[in-house]
Amino acid sequence: MPPYGQRTPLTYSSERVPRFTRTERALHWIHAIAFLALLFTGIAMYSQTLSVFIGRRYWVRFVHILAGYVLVFGPLLLSFFNWRTIRKDMEEMDLWDRDDFAWLKRPWRILWGGETVPQGKFNAGQKLNAIFSAACIVVFGVTGLIMWQFEHFPRWLVSNAILVHDNLSWIAAAVWLGHLYLSVINPSTRESLRGITLGWVRASWAKRHHSKWLEDGEEGTKARFL
Amino acid sequence: MDEKPKEKVKARFGRRMFIGFLVAGALGLVVSRELASKVGGLFDSMSLGERDPAKGVSPDSGIPRPRGKFRIYTVNGVPEFNPATWRFTVDGLVESPVSLSYNEVLKLPKDSQVSDFQCVTGWQVWDVHWEGIRIKTLLEMVKPRPEARYIKLYSSDGEYTESLSLEDALVSDVLLAYRMVGDALPEEQGMPLRLVVPKMYGYKSIKWVHRLELTDKVHYGYWEVRGYPGDATIRPENPFDIFI
């Protein structure tokens, strides 16, 4: 591993560990850009004040639908190029051990950077977030399609779709704010931002937050049923 | 003693959670309207910056309180209204075109109605009280020529247009409204004049109307050239609908 650099505080290990491949980072950022475009165009159409201020409803709606396409088909397209990596991560998200459930019982420990339950490549919160996000793609996709192609669906279904779509947006926005806080602001977790941008993290941080991943490497994905 | 260390034991729990979220979403797709009507204001209260449409209602006015909330859609902002310079014209294939000031519009024979408003995107508002003029009143003034078959309506926002066949325009609950729920039409609701077509989706009910042009061929309006049906007649509820 190349040294981290001159500005590294002595208390940190200078060793880098590769965290996310280019495929994983592309997946994250395609999702992120599409999500933000959807969130802001969605708010622009939902809020009376903003929609009156911005006007151009057709174009806001157009960007919203376009970003919806990216959100749904971006990950599929990437899977087509590098299914191995994405499949491996999905496997990680799917498999939960006792440590994951123990982590989930006291998730706030992550906030002050104290000792947490040993975790694999993703901690239980990250798994939950990824699973929720994946489910959101489906639910937003289906309800959005019903709203968009309203003339082919019964009216009660269209009203229900709009309610689910709107109210789930608030939940998704809140989850995004939490995600933003943990990855950019919270001192004990913001190292992870390096992983999803540059692709590597410091070994000392990985040892504290993802010790099983650091120790087992790929072994950690091997499944044994409960 | 050959038990494996605990952290090595794993379950395929992620996919179950994923399915769980999808089931919750599907459930919402079936019951959320029912739930929203029970929970009442909770869902509505999340709407950002909406004006209470019932603010002009006093208990003894006899005007019902509308149920539900309008969502305000604009395609080109809210045009400014100046009563001193604003003109309302009815022209095209007519014998005697007219151009009226705001005060002259207010002096025309007035009518009122209570009707529901249904948006194509799924929301609706029930029991909205409107006051304004019937299209019939205007047609009697301008005397359409025999070849006139449609009315094209223009919005002051400079972009939005709509059209109605003469038959549709003369349906008894079609109104050009300048008052709403006992108060002057709010500017985001189309001040000074808007169309109300209760039997059609809201995109037909063009706001900020300043001109009616009688034509012999159909015109496709703002949303209609962008994919919405030219006939905006509200679809009946699904006959198998049990969630009304």
Image (cartoon, coloured by chain):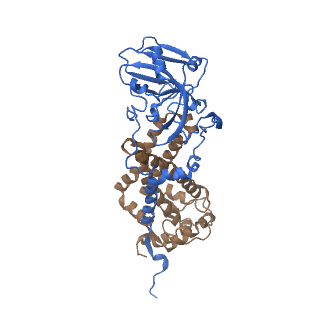
Chain colours: A brown, B blue
Q: Is residue B196 above or below residue A83?
A: above
Q: Is residue B64 above or below residue B216?
A: below
User: How many discs appear?
Assistant: 0
Image quadrant assignment for residue B95: top left
Estimate the x, y position of residue B35 in percent, counting from the top left: 51, 53
Outermost residue to the top: B96
The foreground one among B32 and A33 is B32
Question: Would residue A52 be visible to someone looking at this image?
Answer: yes
For image coordinates 47% across by 26% down, the residue present is B159
Q: Is residue B47 above or below residue B73?
A: below
Q: Is residue A52 above or below residue A14?
A: above
The foreground one among B54 and B217 is B54
> The C terminus of chain A lies in which quarter of the figure?
bottom left
The foreground one among B149 and B174 is B174
Estimate the x, y position of residue A156 in percent, counting from the top left: 43, 47
Image quadrant assignment for residue B232: top left
Estimate the x, y position of residue B149 in percent, counting from the top left: 37, 21
Estimate the x, y position of residue A95 in percent, counting from the top left: 44, 69
Question: Would residue B71 be visible to someone looking at this image?
Answer: no
Q: Is residue B17 left or right of residue A114?
A: left
